[in-house]
Amino acid sequence: MRKFIQRKIPLAWLQLTREKPRLLVALAGIAFADILMFMQLAFQQALFDSNVRLHSSLDGEIVLINPQSNAINFLESFSQRRLYQTLALSEVASVHPIYLGLTEWKNPETRALAEVLVIGTNPRDKVFNLPGVQQNIEKIKLPDVVLFDRGSRPEFGAIASEFEQGKKITAEVGGRRIKVGGIAELGASFGSDGNLITSDQNFLRLFKDRKYGLIDLGVIKLKPAANAEIVLEKLRQYLPDDVKVFSKQEFIDYEKDYWARSTPIGFIFTLGTIMGFIVGTVIVYQILYSEVSDHLSEYATLKAMGYTQTYLLLVVFQEALILASLGYVPGFAFAILQYNLARNATLLPIFMTASRAVMVFLLTVLMCFISGFIAVRKLRSADPADIF
């Protein structure tokens, strides 16, 4: 009989399926908690990924910024002389100054305003590994011509589609009339709704209060045989403290750290994930506690028949594992749907990843096991003497 119960008809499964409405409520609660964790983790990753797209696209190994700079949208200027000083090192192949600035874009049709990030670079430099930039780089040599980012939000207007249909696009940026000379692909972020790429001369025409030679970002390309780590240390010793020297990866990590630690939005996404975990734990605990309470006399009978306390505890943990597995499936499926909707609505890089899928599943199992551990305290009170 014992083998029959253990192998043929698992006791944990029979208990869960005995009251199907309660089981469905439990699975819905777990799925809701999973969806909440999936969405918060996805938004947090989209926050990081969208804000380091420009960093990742830089064609160089070392980056210089002002030490007072916090993030790509809040960079302080520094003298480009510091950048050209690095040419004194034999390992340095070339240097590339970049200007960055936020200003207003006026939608050509609706006249609505939107904030745009303008990126200025020397057209002779190949500094961005972005689709559409090198193909159209010659066009931004002309006065007041920019490359429009296809990934900009809808409030900018249907610029990319109209341009590709052969229409001539003009718009007002920072109070100045500009022409769209081509389409590039960078993507919107939490820091900027859209992007324009243009020449350094056009940038200074848009930002008249900026002075030539005061740059926001310096990119250094090394010769093929150069050791980036050694050059990095040399530059840190060689350059004064009025510039900060990063490797490309350190620059990416610096940006992510800013959004994770120095802004409320990074904390909010982390808190949302924790809240989803807590909500799921409470829901599963209520279900398991009810299951144990409703079958307390049956557990006492099993004890009288010789089943150990450990066996009964394993039954509750089996229930927790079954709930975690069954509740995860609809949560995962609905999260995929939500990712697609959120990606289309925000144009942010929101995708399901294998690591996140595994992480949320492990969190779900942990959530259910914690609930089971709390619920089994009631099981210890199942005394055979109470029913005889």
Image (cartoon, rainbow, N blue to C red):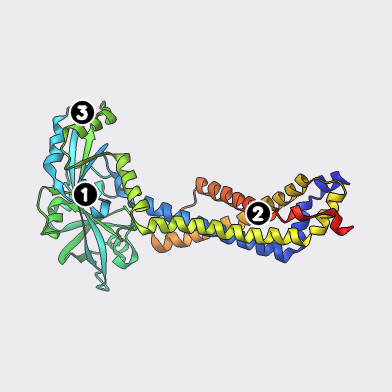
Circle 3: element type: loop
Across and down, in percent, residue 274 comes to 50, 56
Q: Is 7 above or below relative to 37?
A: above
Q: Which label sits on residue 68?
A: 1
Viewer can see residue 309: yes
- Alpha-carbon distance for marks 3 and 2? 62 Å
Mark 3, Cα crowd under 10 Å, few <14 / some 14-19 / many 20+, is some
- Alpha-carbon distance for marks 1 and 2? 49 Å
Left or right: 246 in relation to 269: left
Q: Which label sits on residue 77?
A: none
Q: Quadrant of the C terminus?
A: bottom right
Residue at 79% x, 59% y is 295
Residue at 10% x, 59% y is 208
Viewer can see residue 56: no
User: Looking at the image, which is closer to me, 214 or 206?
Assistant: 214
User: Circles 1 and 3: CB distance less than 8 Å?
Assistant: no
Circle 2: element type: helix
Instruction: Tell me which amino acid carries mark 3.
Output: Glu
Across and down, in percent, residue 316 comes to 72, 52
Q: Residue furthest front?
A: 385
Circle 1: element type: loop
Across and down, in percent, residue 290 comes to 72, 62
- Alpha-carbon distance for marks 1 and 3? 27 Å
Mark 1, Cα crowd under 10 Å, few <14 / some 14-19 / many 20+, is some
Q: Quadrant of residue 127?
A: top left
Q: Which residue is mark 2?
A: 374
Q: Which residue is mark 3?
A: 91
Give the mark toward the camera: 1 or 2: 2
